[in-house]
Image (cartoon, coloured by chain):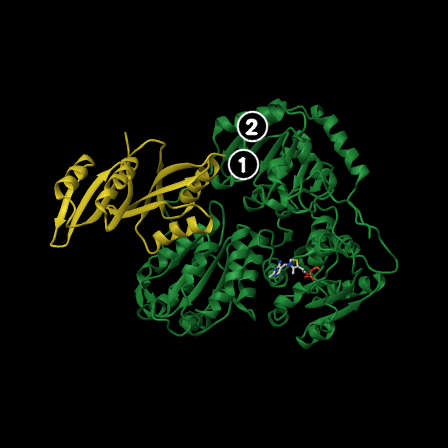
Chain colours: A green, B yellow
Amino acid sequence: MEMTGAQMVIEAMKLEGVDTVFGYPGGAIMNVYDEIYKQKEFRHILTRHEQAAVHAADGYARATGKVGVAFVTSGPGFTNAVTGLATAYMDSVPIVVVSGQVPISLIGTDAFQEIDATGISRSCTKHNFLVRSAKELPRILKEAFYLAASGRPGPVHVDIPKDVTAETAKFDYPARIDIPTYRPTTKGNLRQIKKAAEVICKAKRPVFYLGGGIVHSNSAELVRELVAETKIPAVETLMARGVLEHDNPLLLGMVGMHGSYQANMAMSEADLMIALGPRFDDRVTGKVSEFGKHAKIIHVDIDPSSIGKLVDVDYPIVGDLKEVLEVMIPKVKECVDPDRYQAWRDILKRYNEIHPLAYEDSDKVIKPQWVIERVGQVLGDKAVISTDVGQHQMWTAQFYPFSFPRQFVTSGGLGTMGFGFPAAVGVKRACPDKISVNFTGDGSILMNIQELVTAVESRLPVINIVLNNHYLGMVRQWQTFFYEKRYAETDLSFQPDFVRLAEACGGIGYRVETKEEFDEALNDAIEKGVVAMIDVIVDREENVLPMVPSGGTLYNMLLEYKD
Amino acid sequence: MKVERRVISVIVQNEHSVLSRITGLFAARGYNIETLTVAPIPESGMSRLTIETRGNVRVIEQIIKQLHKLIPTYKVIEHEEMIEKEMVMMKFPINESLSNIQALCEAYNGGIANVSSQHIITMIADEPKRVRHFIEAAQRFHPIEIVRGGVVAMERE
Ligand SMILES: Cc1ncc(C[n+]2csc(CCOP(=O)(O)OP(=O)(O)O)c2C)c(N)n1
């Protein structure tokens, strides 16, 4: 069938089963928007900033595993979207971002709103395309979706010049795709898997090191089975929160800079680390030369370049975690004796008794951790939790009782302030039956505050809970610990009235200074089901603990801070 | 870890900005490029790049994996032992001894490429190590300009 490039974009969305596009129009992409106006296949959600459009698509993708989609215009529209691409890239999130570009004849002339978009996105996407003609557009769009979702997922950027969207050509959408240069290995090497099973059964102090790859490959069920069968304790990275249920007795908690004492000690004293889809991030490993010093390492990952990048691995297995686990579990079952690890479990239990993850509550001032626990008690698995970046993010990771994968949506690799709210809008669109909560800080929330308008207009209720410490808290904490309390530009005492700000945009605002007020506000927000902003005044000086100072070793944690 | 020299051949799909993907990868990750040559492989829609690089074992391993990871990469060929050649052109003043220069070039698989009223231009092609020797030896004829072509390599088998 003959159609214009713009119509092809719409058709491709239809064929890919896209039900939502987040975006923002402009000159170079107007032909596509004209077709959006005429169609009924998907819903377009107009964010109020391109960065938010990409974060919303990202939140949608993280919550579902489906490819998230955003449309932006050329030049400033695209550059605004870059932080969104980079955020998705660092966390391997499958999204497709389509940008308009100046007409081909004007490319390279510094035309109005021209920027070398693919030049910019090259280093923060899995792949990108500059489309040269309408004829190649169907194939490129098909490849974009395929590349985003397959192998190690990631963002794909498609830059379409305006004349290509006007040009007509035959629409031949490939049913299947075969890129000879791109064939991710999904089946793990059988011999390696067998060997891994053997070492697991022979280990004395093994630990599972669970990473985001489990979420991407939808293999949490299998991981739960493997943990249950072996009774080997497990730590989770930030990206793996929710893989195991929070009350699983084998879950030692989060690992890394703000990991629990028992989790970090387990990693330090283990004789075998079974790494399932993590990437040995420096926020997890601390000083690399000390990381897992006594352990042999099994590492399963779909991306060969993740294996051995930072730490030498004894048993590398390249493959899709799901496929690998399906083979590995029966092999492990054959030889494993869960009692073998009893002494090890006892040691770790004692570590947890000595230094449990805890905070000191107060009846004078609200502790941020209390708020998170409270929301956990009230909403539990009925909510999907997004966060911004800072102390509130770490407390959420530590204290929210996660019970399923994809329940926690957070920017891990890039650590993007301003991510939480738009991501939570995308989450609400993806999971209408869940309550979408965004834990945020008084700094972060202002980085995409305009999305109040989007959320209200689009009827996508998000409950923003601002853990308001009147500081850029995480930076303030480092200044307290490592810069002798020289609080350079981190005091946020001057702030907007968050209640009126929410109301000005059609949402509802609450200011909360006591636990009772918090309960009332939360219940009211849940009941009303509208876009809410709960401004919770919390203890200003609270610190995130334990803490492994940057570049330190996991077994040397700061466990308390005394003035 | 010991830093070593390595020659890597990459076969890529001929497409828009594929070269910038590769050089961008090296720049972004702080890898070295000592020499780089690129040319299409006849009637294949592919191009072959030869990259001469340096790094410790872990870096070299990462370079190879990262090159593989690029979507247009078809194949990464890397051996400790490849048959390597590099071409060099050199320009000398006309008053230097033509016959001595010619003898030197012939010792390195080359010869005189052009002689004008002002200059002698020579060309040689040899293994990278011998290329270095040639450049050293040629200094006594006061070369005006040196153009190195970069290493090209082929697997022995
Ligand atoms: C876009 C961006 N700019 C700067 C930073 C550096 N940074 C990390 S945490 C943080 C403070 C965040 O403050 P707030 O949102 O109030 O959260 P809190 O730490 O107080 O919970 C800053 C500035 C960042 N992560 N992202």
Callout 2: residue from which chain? A
Please tell me which of labels 1 and 2 falls first in the chain.
2
Q: What is the crowding at mark 2: few (fewer than 14 residues within 10 Å), some, or many (at least 20)?
A: many
**Whether residue B36 is situated above or below residue A555 in the rendered picture:** below
> Residue shown at 59%/61% (left/top)?
A426
Q: Secondary structure at mark 1?
A: strand
Q: Nearer the viewer, residue A414 or A143?
A: A414
Q: What is the crowding at mark 1: few (fewer than 14 residues within 10 Å), some, or many (at least 20)?
A: many
Q: Nearer the viewer, residue A241 or B3?
A: B3
- Percent across and percent down for residue A151 are 47, 45
Q: The residue under label 1 is which amino acid type?
A: Val
Give the alpha-carbon distance from disc 1 to disc 2, as whole Å. 10 Å
What is the quadrant of residue A212 in the picture? top right
Callout 1: residue from which chain? A
Residue B156 relative to residue A340: left or right: left
Residue A159 relative to residue B129: left or right: right
Q: Ligand 1 quadrant?
A: bottom right
Q: Nearer the viewer, residue A201 or B32?
A: B32
The circle drawn on residue A561 is: none
What is the quadrant of residue A529 in the picture? bottom right
- Percent across and percent down for residue A13 are 45, 60
> Residue shown at 64%/47% (left/top)?
A238
Q: Secondary structure at mark 2?
A: helix
| Circle 2 residue | A196
Residue A562 relative to residue A158: left or right: right
Residue A376 relative to residue A412: left or right: right
Q: The residue under label 2 is which amino acid type?
A: Ala
What is the quadrant of residue A331 in the picture? top right
| Circle 1 residue | A300
Q: Are marks 1 and 2 in contact (CB under 8 Å)?
A: yes
- Percent across and percent down for residue A28 are 41, 71
Q: Is residue A281 visible?
A: yes
